C-alpha cells in the first residue's frame, strides 16, 4: 500500500535555528573545517526506543509570518503586454508558490519549471482567443516576460526564476515554426483528433502509451512542413533544422490545446506531459569518482574503506535537488554504470546499504532523503506553517545494481521493480492521515547547503 509524507517547510528562522541546523548538518558533513565537526545530529534528535519509529528532527519554530505571501508587493507592469493576467490569477499564484524563493533551485526540475512552462503556454494560448495568434512577437514577448516575472517575484517567487528555468522572451514567440495563426493551424491539422487525444490524459498510461504525445508530434510535424523549404529538401540535408522546427511547433500545439481547455484543466494536462519527460532522465550531475574506484576496486578488499568512499560520493549527490522516485531509479542505474566502467563489479549498493532516497536532497538523518512522487505535484502554502510538498514513502528500498542484461530503468519496462509507480495514487491527499505528517523547518538548511 502506498503511503505519503507531507513536508511543511517554514521560511522564518531565528539565529538559534541556524545554530542548531549547522550542528545537525554535521551528520552529512555539510559543515566542513568548523569547530562544530565533533558534534553529532544524534545529540539533537529525540531518544528512540527499539520499538518506536524514528521521529523527525524539529528545530525551534520561529513565530514570524511568511513575509513574501502575507505582504505581496505590487508589481510595476509595462502596460504593453496584452496577456490577461487577471484570468490566470490562481495559476500565477500557484507558480509563485511552486517557485518560491528558497526552494526554486531545488524543486526546479520537478515542480517549479514544469509549472512555469505550463503557465506560459496557457497564458499565450488563452490570449489567442482574442488575438487569433498562438505566439507573441519579439518585442511584446520581452515586455510580457518582464511583467510575468514582476508578478511572480512580487508573490514570493525566486527573482532569478527565468535563469533557473532557462526561460527567454523567445519562449513566447513562434520560434522557427511557420504557423502561428489559429485559423491556419486548424485548417492544417486534424484538430478534433488532437483534442480527443489530449483532452483527457491518463497520468499512468500516457508516459508509456504516448497517446497525447504522439498526437502532438503528428500535429507539430504537419505544421512544420508548411514551409516550402522543408518540402523541397531531399535526403538528410536540413534534418537538424527540421527537428528544431518541429520542436518549436510543439509549443504552438500546446498553446492551441491550452486555448481549448480551461486553465486548470490545461495545467493538469501540460504537467502530466512534462512529467513524462522529467521522469525519463536523471537530473543529477555526477562528480569525478576516482576515490570511489580506488576504495572499491580490486574486489573490494576493504569494505569499510569502500563504503566510506561511497558515502562521501553520495553525499555530493544529496546536495543537488529533490528528485522523483523514478528519477532516482534512473540515477541509481546511471551511477551503477559509471561505477562498473571504473572496474567495480561488486554490488556496492547492497554492500553499503545505498537506497533510492539516498540520491535526493536530505531532510534529517533519520528520515533521510525526500523523493517526490512520479505524478505531477505542486507545493502548497499555509500562511501559519509555511510551504509544503509531498514526499513519497515508497522509496525506502535498496537501489538496484544494474545488470548486464538490463537495457534501461524505464518505468515502462515491466520487468523492472520500482517504487510508487504513478498507478499508485501517491499524490492523492486523501491517502495521508495525520500520523503520516510532520513539520520540518528547512529553509536555512537549504541556504547553507547552497552556499557551501
Image (cartoon, rainbow, N blue to C red):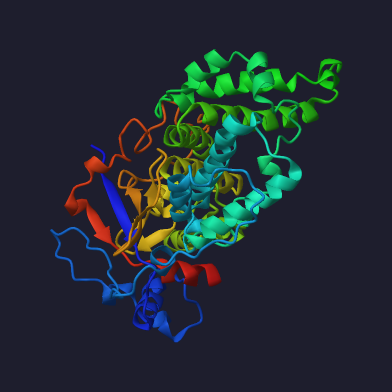
Picture coordinates of residue 161, whole percent (x, y): 57, 56
From what the image shows, is residue 56 above or below residue 31? Answer: above
From what the image shows, is residue 38 above or below residue 345? Answer: below
Residue 370 lies left or right of residue 246; in this view the side is left
Residue drawn at point x = 75 percent, y = 19 percent: 225
Picture coordinates of residue 235, whole percent (x, y): 84, 17
* Quadrant for the C terminus in the image: bottom right
Q: Taking the image as drawn, is residue 355 in sight?
A: no
Q: Quadrant of the rendered structure where residue 56 is?
A: bottom left
Extreme-bottom residue of the structure: 35
Q: Quadrant of the rendered structure where residue 308 is?
A: bottom left
In the foreground, 131 or 168: 131
Residue drawn at point x = 55 percent, y = 34 percent: 126
Residue drawn at point x = 51 percent, y = 26 percent: 260
In the foreground, 86 or 280: 86
Q: Quadrant of the rendered structure where residue 297 is?
A: bottom right
Picture coordinates of residue 195, whole percent (x, y): 51, 19
Residue drawn at point x = 39 percent, y = 49 percent: 371
Question: What is the tally of numbered marks visible in this picture?
Answer: 0
* Quadrant for the N terminus in the image: top left
Residue 33 lies left or right of residue 179; in this view the side is left
From what the image shows, is residue 15 above or below residue 273? Answer: below
In the foreground, 162 or 6: 162
Q: Taking the image as drawn, is residue 272 in sight?
A: yes
Picture coordinates of residue 403, whole percent (x, y): 49, 35
Amino acid at each position: 500500500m502506498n503511503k505519503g509524507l507531507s513536508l511543511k517547510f517554514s521560511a522564518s528562522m531565528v539565529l538559534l535555528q541556524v545554530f542548531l541546523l549547522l550542528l545537525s548538518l554535521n551528520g552529512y558533513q555539510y559543515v566542513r573545517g568548523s569547530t562544530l565537526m565533533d558534534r553529532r545530529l544524534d545529540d539533537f534528535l529525540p531518544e528512540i526506543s527499539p520499538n518506536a519509529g524514528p521521529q523527525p528532527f524539529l528545530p525551534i519554530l520561529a513565530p514570524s509570518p511568511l513575509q513574501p505571501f502575507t505582504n505581496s508587493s505590487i508589481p510595476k507592469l509595462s502596460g504593453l503586454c496584452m496577456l490577461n493576467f487577471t484570468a490566470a490569477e490562481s495559476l500565477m499564484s500557484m507558480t509563485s508558490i511552486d517557485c518560491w524563493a528558497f526552494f526554486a533551485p531545488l524543486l526546479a526540475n520537478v515542480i517549479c519549471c514544469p509549472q512555469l512552462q505550463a503557465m506560459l503556454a496557457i497564458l499565450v494560448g488563452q490570449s489567442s482567443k482574442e488575438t487569433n495568434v498562438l505566439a507573441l512577437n519579439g518585442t511584446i514577448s520581452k515586455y510580457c516576460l518582464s511583467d510575468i516575472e514582476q508578478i511572480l517575484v512580487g508573490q514570493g517567487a525566486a527573482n532569478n526564476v527565468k535563469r533557473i528555468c532557462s526561460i527567454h522572451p523567445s519562449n513566447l514567440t513562434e520560434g522557427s515554426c511557420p504557423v502561428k495563426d489559429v485559423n491556419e493551424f486548424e485548417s492544417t491539422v486534424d484538430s478534433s483528433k488532437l483534442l480527443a487525444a489530449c483532452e483527457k490524459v491518463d497520468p499512468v498510461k500516457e508516459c508509456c502509451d504516448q497517446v497525447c504525445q504522439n498526437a502532438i508530434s503528428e500535429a507539430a510535424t504537419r505544421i512544420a512542413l508548411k514551409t516550402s523549404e522543408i518540402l523541397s529538401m531531399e535526403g538528410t540535408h536540413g534534418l537538424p533544422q527540421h527537428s528544431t522546427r518541429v520542436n518549436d511547433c510543439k509549443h504552438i500545439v500546446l498553446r492551441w490545446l491550452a486555448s481549448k481547455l480551461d486553465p486548470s484543466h490545461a495545467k493538469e494536462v501540460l504537467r502530466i506531459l512534462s512529467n513524462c519527460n522529467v521522469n525519463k532522465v536523471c537530473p543529477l550531475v555526477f562528480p569525478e569518482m576516482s576515490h570511489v574506484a580506488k576504495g572499491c576496486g580490486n574486489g573490494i578488499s576493504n569494505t569499510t574503506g569502500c563504503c566510506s568512499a561511497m558515502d562521501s560520493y553520495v553525499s555530493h549527490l544529496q546536495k543537488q535537488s529533490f528528485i522523483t522516485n523514478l528519477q532516482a531509479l534512473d540515477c541509481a542505474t546511471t551511477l551503477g554504470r559509471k561505477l562498473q566502467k571504473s572496474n567495480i563489479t561488486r554490488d556496492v549498493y547492497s554492500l553499503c546499504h545505498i537506497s533510492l532516497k539516498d540520491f535526493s536532497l536530505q531532510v534529517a538523518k533519520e528520515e533521510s532523503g525526500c523523493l517526490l512522487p512520479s505524478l505531477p505535484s505542486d507545493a502548497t502554502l499555509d500562511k501559519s506553517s509555511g510551504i509544503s510538498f509531498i514526499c513519497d514513502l515508497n522509496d525506502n528500498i535498496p537501489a538496484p545494481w544494474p545488470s548486464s542484461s538490463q537495457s534501461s530503468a524505464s518505468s515502462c519496462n515491466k520487468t523492472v521493480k520500482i517504487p510508487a509507480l504513478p498507478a499508485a495514487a501517491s499524490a492523492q491527499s486523501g491517502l495521508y492521515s495525520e500520523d503520516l505528517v510532520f513539520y520540518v523547518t528547512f529553509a536555512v538548511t537549504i541556504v547553507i547547503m547552497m552556499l557551501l
